[in-house]
Amino acid sequence: MTMRRDAALNPPAAVAPKRHFGIPRRRKAGAADIFHQHNKTDNCIDWPRFNVNFSGVRIISSIAAMQQLAKKWQCSGKRIGFVPTMGYLHAGHLSLVREARKRVGKAGRVVVSIYVNPTQFGPKEDFSKYPRDLKRDLKLCRETGVDIVFTPGDKEMYPALECGDMSPLSKRRHVGALQNFSTYVVEEQLSHTMEGASRLTHFRGVTTVVAKLFNLVLPDVAVFGAKDWQQAAIIKRMAADLNFPVKIIVAPTLREPDGLAMSSRNKYLAGDMRRQAVVLWRSIQKARSAVKKSSKSIPAARLKADLKRFIEREPDTPSRRRSGAASARLDYVEFFEPDTLSPVSKVTRGTHMALAVFVGKTRLIDNAPL
Ligand code: AMP
């Protein structure tokens, strides 16, 4: 198996490898949740085994090379499926890759971008320590049938200073500090609540980088995860408003067997924290069961207060009591219309719930329909 960096414009191998895009058996639990079944643990996840036989995945880090290749594919009528990620891939990401492949077919091309986008992190957030493992990501992409892994660099994505060391960009990743880059894409309706209220410039960074990536990869189909529900809604709106000729697909959230939504940030969770992290999923279940039991709608304010109490005292494990460690802390919980993201004052079946919780220093998010 070979991996080629920036080899996109090389002629393809003479004999196309056989590819198998099987999907593992998964248990459905609710419209937007898939639980991952595994036997062995590797950072909480055991990767599904596939009957794969690939000659390799091409790695492109140059913006010009990516755009040229995408244009070439477009001209020859190849459909392009795209999965933007920040890397440190897990089975949730790979499920998006499989969805992209399903949409474009064997004759199409699937591109995964791996880019930890500095402009979507706030100055006090985890940009510099965000988990990265490109070698492992490439192996997973190769095993899942990705054609191109696109790994642009900060210097090309956000031309900052004309000379001098850009690294670590994190030191002045504050968007205002970037010189030679001054155009942002801002969605103005859906971006103010929930994640947008807690992370002020987050969605500006997301819409900007996704717009840039769409211009470079020229996808026919782009797949996003329901795990980031608000993000997916904003991207859909951006694509419609700015006439990007791309179909946005939102694929279900993949979960660990105990319900924790898979996330690259789960790597931060050790020992008790990992156990505490299930409180997000338990909160969703608690809200679901309250809605199911109630014959009429439930005031959102009351349910929010109940969930805050529930989250901030759960789970009270003996070792946490011994260590005096803080319990989970609710950042926000919101109930809203799934499409418009408009908050509702009365919660009923079909209302969507999203929450963000600090477990230690790790901020986790989750959401689901009730
Ligand atoms: P990230 O690498 O965290 O930026 O995520 C890249 C894409 O993967 C986004 O569209 C996420 O919504 C999606 N994603 C993240 N976690 C999951 C998950 N557990 N299940 C499905 N998709 C996910």
Image (tube, rainbow, N blue to C red):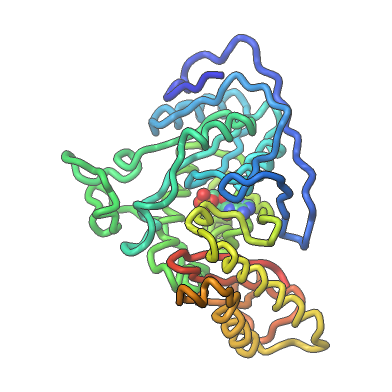
Q: Is 337 placed above or below 68 here?
A: below
Q: Residue at x 74, y 81 (%)?
A: 348
Q: Is 260 placed above or below 358 here?
A: above
In the rendering, at what x and y percent does residue 212 appear?
A: 43, 45
Looking at the rendered image, the quarter that the C terminus falls into is bottom right
Taking depth in this image into account, of 155 and 247 the one nearest to the observer is: 155
In the rendering, at what x and y percent does residue 263 appear?
A: 56, 54
User: What residue occupies the far left of the structure in this picture?
Assistant: 164
Q: Is residue 21 rendered to the left or right of residue 117? A: right
Q: Residue at x 38, y 58 (%)?
A: 126
> What number of labels is visible?
0
Q: Is 192 placed above or below 294 here?
A: above
Looking at the rendered image, the quarter that the N terminus falls into is top right
In the rendering, at what x and y percent does residue 130 appear?
A: 41, 51
Taking depth in this image into account, of 324 and 72 the one nearest to the observer is: 324
**Quarter of the image holding residue 345?**
bottom right
Instruction: Please say whether residue 239 is visible from this viewpoint.
Output: no
Taking depth in this image into account, of 202 and 145 the one nearest to the observer is: 145
Q: Residue at x 52, y 68 (%)?
A: 190
User: What residue occupies the far top of the structure in this picture?
Assistant: 14
Q: Is residue 75 rendered to the left or right of residue 252? A: left
Q: Residue at x 62, y 59 (%)?
A: 261
**Quarter of the image holding residue 48?**
top right
In the rendering, at what x and y percent does residue 303 appear?
A: 65, 85
Q: Is residue 80 rendered to the left or right of residue 214? A: right
Instruction: Please say whether residue 289 is visible from this viewpoint.
Output: yes
**Quarter of the image holding residue 66?**
top left
